[in-house]
Image (cartoon, helix red, strand yellow):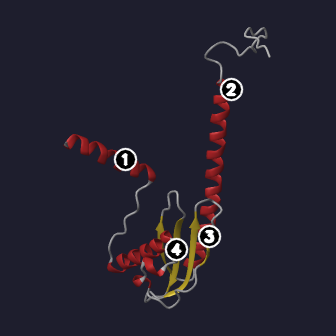
Amino acid sequence: CQRNFLNTERAPDRGPPGEQGGNTMLQLVLVIAIAFVLQALLSGIQMKHFSDEFVKLRRQGKVAVGRKAGGFHAGAIVMFLIDDKGKIRKGKKLEGVTFLARVKDFPGFEGRYVGDLKKEDGPRNHKNLGLAMEDAALTYRKFTRGEVIPDPPSPFQKVGIAARNLFGRRSAA
């Protein structure tokens, strides 16, 4: 078996240097842009569904809401329809990682005082659902005491806080 070290075939014309891969880069940018728009659209549909469910509960009375972001794990939001004394009449939950998550009934808490809920009261296999329940209890207790309930920081605010902490530590050293 003899090998031919001289390649007599001509390589395909790829255009001038610097333009190679330009098409690939454009395609990559387009795919990312389409994914971003699709994610925004589908998230909007999910938020509309959640909002509709919240309004349905709100028309029946007071609602205590708790939330726990999931990051790379399933996040959770709970809503409890409560009476004037804080007793739970009905529960709903939204849990999941993707836009496919939908609001579902969350039974088993009827008649309990919402302010007494703890994370241990939630399902053992879903830590964030328990933390969302605890957040609903904390929010309700703050509301009944007349305290201000602060909005959680947005993702951009979290980046700013992290950067401030990082650079603040460096300058203090």
Q: What element carries label 4?
A: strand
Disc 3 or disc 4, which is closer to the eye? 4
Callout 3 crowding tier (Cα within 10 Å): few <14, some 14–19, many ≥20: few
The tag earlier along the polypeptide, 4 or 2, is: 2
In 3D space, how far apart are the residues under numbered discs 2 and 1 (Cα atoms)? 35 Å
Callout 4 crowding tier (Cα within 10 Å): few <14, some 14–19, many ≥20: many
**Residue 61 in the image: x percent, y percent?**
52, 83
Asked if labels 4 and 3 touch by Cβ distance under 8 angstroms, the answer is: no
Viewer-nearest residue: 89 or 35: 35
Asked if labels 3 and 1 touch by Cβ distance under 8 angstroms, the answer is: no
Q: What element carries label 3?
A: helix
Res 86 quadrant in image = bottom left
Query: Mark 3 — residue?
Result: 52
Query: Mark 4 — residue?
Result: 78
The tag earlier along the polypeptide, 2 or 3, is: 2
The tag earlier along the polypeptide, 2 or 1, is: 2
Asked if labels 1 and 2 touch by Cβ distance under 8 angstroms, the answer is: no
| Screen quadrant of the N terminus | top right
Asked if labels 2 and 4 touch by Cβ distance under 8 angstroms, the answer is: no
The tag earlier along the polypeptide, 1 or 3, is: 3
In 3D space, how far apart are the residues under numbered discs 4 and 1 (Cα atoms)? 28 Å
Query: Mark 1 — residue?
Result: 160
In 3D space, how far apart are the residues under numbered discs 2 and 3 (Cα atoms)? 43 Å
- Amino acid type for the residue under numbered disc 1: Gly
**Residue extending furthest front?**
1
